[in-house]
Amino acid sequence: MRELRDKARSLLDPVIRDFYEGGADSETALAENERAFARLALLPRILAGAGQASTAVRLLGADLDTPVLVAPTAFHRLAHPDGEVATARAAAAAGTVLIASMAATTAVAEVTAAARDVRPDAQVWFQLYLQPEPEVTAELVRRAEAAGCTALVVTADSPVFGRHGRDERNGFHDLPPGYAAENMRDLPGTPPGGTRPIAMSPALSWADLRRLRELTRLPVVLKGVLHPADAARAADEGLAAVVVSNHGGRQLDAAPATVEALPAVVAAIAGRIPVLLDGGVRTGSDVVTALALGATAVAVGRPVLWGLAAEGEDGVARVLRTLREQTAHVLTLCGARDRADLAPDQVVARGIREVPAC
Ligand SMILES: Cc1cc2nc3c(=O)[nH]c(=O)nc-3n(C[C@H](O)[C@H](O)[C@H](O)COP(=O)(O)O)c2cc1C
Ligand SMILES: CC(C)CC(=O)C(=O)O
């Protein structure tokens, strides 16, 4: 992973590299996502007789080969000319879900076609920001459905754009000439062939989410959940899953590390719907830590961009393969056959522990 990251860093235009790597404000949340995993250790169970580990997971009715999904990230063609098509092919081959970003540089129909070309049952979910104009959101949903996406992922942690100091310093505010957010083309209100900018709105509420659900039969996943009360509400409202996420540290810089927010969300959901997590997942140990704390699966953002920038489709495939292999290895070392054999008491803070009463 480090090798791919370093290769990506050396190949990418520094302005694009900063866009991918950067976080909001002081980049505290960005750094804490990784640091929080580093502060945790796994207590293995021994002599468990668990046998060969399995990374397979069933999620929203689909069987996946790995619990590591591809988080939605914008503008893949800035990383590699094959862009989202390469990512989609690699995710499908890895037997995982690609959450395709609304801010993709490839239209969602082309992304799903690329995934299905590799694997007819490939799972592509469509991430969207609810747009202030209902007819724009409705058209995006219609396109995602027509493209064969199997879930919608609403990102709810962005009532406004995050403040990204690196982009401000670099003057990176728009896509370079020759690139466009293709899902935003020919929407209501755009001139023929034109695109419209993605809007963020602080006026959005649970009522808007309910209206979205009336538009579609697709399961709706809520991304950007950190407060347990919001997690409980998501389950009450009938959402299909939540993603514990602070947007990779790109929105609220004072947000907690996601792995630290996870246990309270898991408790609030109480097994009603799957809980996913993204932010700072870099190794199989991170994956197993999140699973032990109650996540059904995790997603990775920047690692996929590193793989894509370094080696295109092969690089993304390598990132996903490495994480799956490491996850299986760590499960085995923890005495677990799969996620169901893990328990939260196997995750401990580093440092000397009090002697527990046995
Ligand atoms: C360059 C970049 C672009 C992103 N674009 C989106 C996006 O379009 N939609 C979205 O919901 N999240 C977006 N995210 C957030 C990711 O989905 C995810 O929450 C985050 O990257 C996870 O953290 P990680 O990068 O540490 O794995 C983006 C993140 C990055 C780094
Ligand atoms: C185009 C942006 C809205 C994509 C995004 O969510 C991000 O860069 O974090």
Image (cartoon, helix red, strand yellow):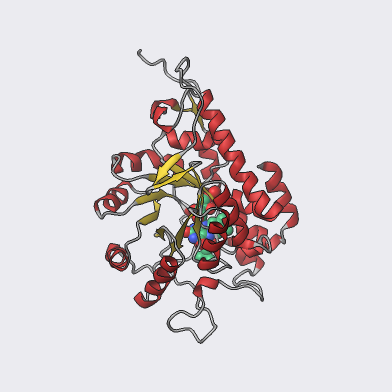
For the point 36% across and 45% down, the residue is 274
Quick one: quadrant of the N terminus? Answer: top right
Residue nearer the viewer, 335 or 343:
335
Q: Quadrant of residue 296?
A: top left
- Residue 199, percent across and down? 45, 72
Let me know if residue 158 appears in the view. yes
- Residue 135, percent across and down? 36, 77
- Residue 183, percent across and down? 51, 71
Residue furthest to the right in view is 10
In-image side of 234 versus 284 (left or right): left
For the point 46% across and 52% down, the residue is 246
For the point 51% across and 77% down, the residue is 185
Quick one: quadrant of the C terminus? Answer: top left
Q: Is residue 135 above or below residue 150?
A: below
Instruction: Report how many numbered discs are placed on residues in the image.
Output: 0
- Residue 73, percent across and down? 54, 58
Q: Is residue 235 above or below residue 170?
A: above
Q: Quadrant of residue 153?
A: bottom left
Residue furthest to the bottom in view is 191
Q: Quadrant of residue 238?
A: bottom left
In-image side of 334 versus 59 (left or right): right
In-image side of 180 versus 294 (left or right): right
Residue furthest to the left in view is 236
For the point 35% across and 13% down, the residue is 357
Let me know if residue 248 appears in the view. no
